[in-house]
Amino acid sequence: ADYDLDGHPDFLSKEIHEQPSALRRVLAGRLDGRFATSRLDGLHLDPRELRGIRRVTFLGCGSAHYAGQMGAALVEELARVPADAEQASEFRYRNPLVDPDTLYVAVSQSGETIDTLAAVEELQRKGGRVVGCVNVIGSAIARQCGAGMFLHAGPEVSVASTKAFSSMTTSFALLALLLGRVRDLSAAHGTRLVDGLRRLPDAVDEALAASDEIAAVAQKYAGARSMFFLGRVRGSAVAREGAQKLKEISYVHAEAYAASELKHGPLALVDATMPCVIVVPDDELVAKNISTIEQVKARGGPVIAVTNADLPDGLADAVIRVPSVEPELDPILLGVPLQLFAYHCAAALGRDIDKPRNLAKSVTVE
Ligand code: G6P
């Protein structure tokens, strides 16, 4: 029954629409309203050990790496602990500096990706502390780590990761909240985040309701040779994963850039043939993002804005609206329409949605 299409034309559609229930499972039993924090017992870290963590480094490949980038941003913002995300493949070959006060988080849907497993083993050999963030129970990475957080997203069949990705980023919000609450994050702030996380699955459901509208936008732009995906700060990893999804399943070239970098290079490529997807979170940087949109428009570039902010009418050529939960958590929501956009571009181009050419669901051999 797990492998039933459930009335969907393909697994990708099914898995995109399963996200509200996947996120409910990620959150189940892990929100602590009384102490305004989260519970991640599988980490096997007590408050004193959590307090001793001086850096968090996420390791993963592909979408798991982009999820790690969102995780690093959440940890820095909520816990004020330095955090970064590394490609596990590069990490294992680089002779990394392994720091005993860093918490390494190995991120993998399958738990079988050879590069990520090798990074875990290299870390352990050098005395690093590594926990897993894995979907498949009993998988190699989960066993090798011996501690961590399972996603419980359910089986992900389609090659492109969607529900596992949003489950990863939601888990990292839980981790960031936990690390924040043993440091300077106040109980009131913690309560706001716990409430926001509780509302997240329904908000994802609401974001999915825009699917038909997004299909119409996708039909209009799927014929492009290339697209830019732009975002600043909270929107930047969202843009990177959005570009990755488009490339993987539609074979349309896409490149993600920090919106603030546009003028430092990529603007040279913007003309009427280069649609720009711009992620605009409703935060302090809205005005900056509006000026990015204006810069693209001034060069004749079509703009597709994905936003939960109120943008001036007529500013963008297409606006995909997303609900809000809390500003720190909204990036999780902003990613959802980008999955649908990639999905509908791929459908418009007649691609093999669940099995894109040249890609494997997990790369378990070198
Ligand atoms: C492959 C897949 C990607 C996936 C990556 C990491 O390259 O095509 O969709 O993101 O592996 O997989 P993992 O199972 O480790 O999350």
Image (cartoon, helix red, strand yellow):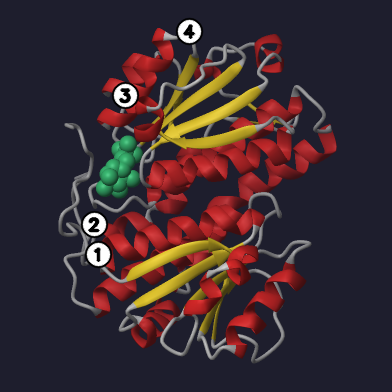
**Which residue type carries mark 3?**
Leu
Image quarter where the N terminus lies is: top left
Q: Which residue is mark 4?
A: 127
Q: Which mark is residue 117?
A: 3
Q: Which residue is mark 1?
A: 8
Q: Secondary structure at mark 3?
A: helix
Q: Secondary structure at mark 4?
A: loop
Query: Along the polypeptide, which appears first: circle 2 or circle 3?
Result: 2
The foreground one among 32 and 279 is 279
Q: Residues within 10 Å of mark 3 (few under 14, many from 20)?
A: many
**Which residue type carries mark 1?**
His
> Where, by quadrant of the figure, is residue 33 drawn?
top right
Q: Residue at x 62, y 71 (%)?
A: 263
Q: Say which of marks 1 and 2 sits in front.
A: 2
C-alpha gap between disc 1 and disc 2: 7 Å
Q: Say which of marks 3 and 1 sits in front.
A: 3
**Which residue type carries mark 4?**
Gly
C-alpha gap between disc 1 and disc 4: 46 Å
